[in-house]
Amino acid sequence: MQMENFAPVMFAGLVLIMLIGFPVAFSLSALGLLSGFIAIEMGWFPPGFMANLPLNVFGILSNETLLAIPFFTLMGAVLEKCGLAEDMLDSMGQLFGPVRGGLGYSVIIVGFILGAITGTVAGQVIAMAMISLPVMMRYGYNMRYSAGVLAASGTITQLVPPSLVLIVMADQLGTDVGQMYKGAWGPSILQVLIFAIYTFLVSRIRPSYVPGVPASARTLQGWALWAKCLRGIIPSAILIFAVLGSMGGLPFMDHAIATPTEAGAMGAVGALVLAAIHRRLNWPMLKEAMNGTMRLTAMVVFILIGSRVFSLVFQGVDGGKWIEHMLSGLPGGQLGFLIAVNVFVFFLAFFLDFFEIAFIILPMLGPVAAKLGIDMVWFGVLLCVNMQTSFMHPPFGFALFYLRGIADTLFKNGALPRKIESRDIYLGAIPWVGLQLLLVAIVIFFPQTVTVFLDKKVEVDVDKIQLEMPVDLQGPGSGGINMDDPFGNRKSGEPDALPMPEPEPEPEPEPEPEAPAPEPGADSKQ
């Protein structure tokens, strides 16, 4: 077998292990190591190739940008335990409840706000379903609409800053996290509007699906109601805006005073302060939040290690050039590439988590997108919008699983009048997946939805982007691997090694002075 034919074999193996359902992180590591040893045996890699692997993985794990993930996760976990969802859903429900479709509007708005606060789909779907689903069923809301709006509103957290997905996207695409956050504001607000417009249309076409709540059900009126709404929103909003503003992640803010890691640490401390103010800070809550943070961080680290091992070997057998040749030859240029990639990612989301897609697929797609002149911030936000559907795909969407579990629990506890079947949840999710795909199309055809808030458009010089290994570093049978830099960590333009200083010339010895001639008659005097 020739080396250029081995990359498609590795890619087919990757697809196979994803379809079988083995844990992705460990499957990637095993596939990468096995492929690496095969490449060494075939003479494509030098024997010392694998010896450099641990140092490279350690260097990847030392990335300061990824250190922000546990901080933002802890911030979201602590704020989630503060009872913010209960307060906001109750106050928003009373504010919009009398309007036809009002409970749907309140779920969408609270989903957007909680998305900026908690950052976790699971916690958001569970919290909103526990509170809102019994209320919506009590007042006669359509079961499928209720299931769909609760699941879809929970996935908004994928896109609303400070989303963990955007941090990973920025790291994998080599862009600034603050710029990625700025680019995500437009699509996230647009998504809320699309969901609200759909609810409005349902209230006009099928008014019985989303009836208004009787005015007698409102326990608060006037200023007391508005005060409760503001008390639930303002403290958390101040914290989120302070965190995003410090790292330059808000529109029309051109300068950052903190790195994403520093901003995340500040957010975690601020969340603990808010929990203390709400009198929810205690050891069981803190322990649960830290356990959740540890589990998510460990999952990310293992997926990162596995994907790195696989991608190193894949790039070593010229997999990057194979992907580039396959995708850059698509008809339609940038548009054809974007449509093909989004269709590919959409179907991958049936089987893969968004972290797995970001760590495995993005390193393959990013260089091709850059060579086509695509703005990396726009590309990252576009894929983030697409990957929201990974939580909504019937029958594999995690948000649907969470919702089904909560619905069963509520029915057993007597909170629901009848059991919600899986069929109702799946059929209820389909229109909302269509709305998310509509947003994908809008972002593709109107990139201004992303770039309008950016500081400046990233200009890509296509002629300077090369995916090929340096020719002068390729040895016979080495597969394009430079043993001084086998993983491509050296930046372009850097010398192969630090230049040795030229030795200073030794000073010439000074001539010894000649001895004076003896005076005449000196011998006779002695």
Image: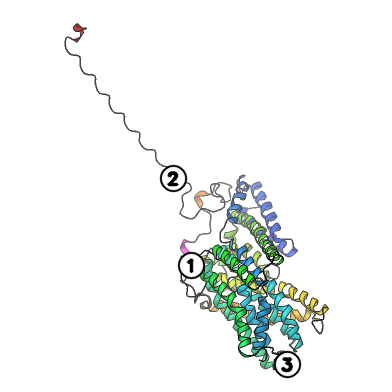
Image mark count: 3
Residue type, numbered disc 2: Pro
Residue 462 part of the magenta segment: yes
Residues 49 and 104: in front is 104
Residue type, numbered disc 1: Ala
Task: From the image, state whether disc 2 or disc 1 is nearer to you.
Answer: 1
Secondary structure under the numbered disc 2 in the rendered image: loop
Looking at the image, residue 344 sits to the left or right of residue 503; the answer is right
Give residue 385's position: percent from left, percent from top: 61, 74
Q: Which residue is mark 1?
A: 256
Secondary structure under the numbered disc 1 in the rendered image: loop
Q: Is residue 194 visible?
A: no
Looking at the image, residue 443 sits to the left or right of residue 349; the answer is left
Separation of residues labelled 1 and 3 (CA atoms) = 49 Å
Taking 214 as reference, is 115 above or below it?
A: above
Secondary structure under the numbered disc 3 in the rendered image: helix
Which residue occupies 68% across, 58% down? 28
Separation of residues labelled 2 and 1 (CA atoms) = 36 Å
Q: Which residue is mark 2?
A: 499
Q: Earlier in the sequence, mark 2 or mark 1?
A: 1
The magenta segment = 458-464
Q: Which residue is mark 3?
A: 208
Give residue 262's position: percent from left, percent from top: 54, 63
Q: Earlier in the sequence, mark 1 or mark 3?
A: 3
Give residue 449's position: percent from left, percent from top: 53, 78
Residue 300 part of the magenta segment: no
Separation of residues labelled 3 and 2 (CA atoms) = 78 Å
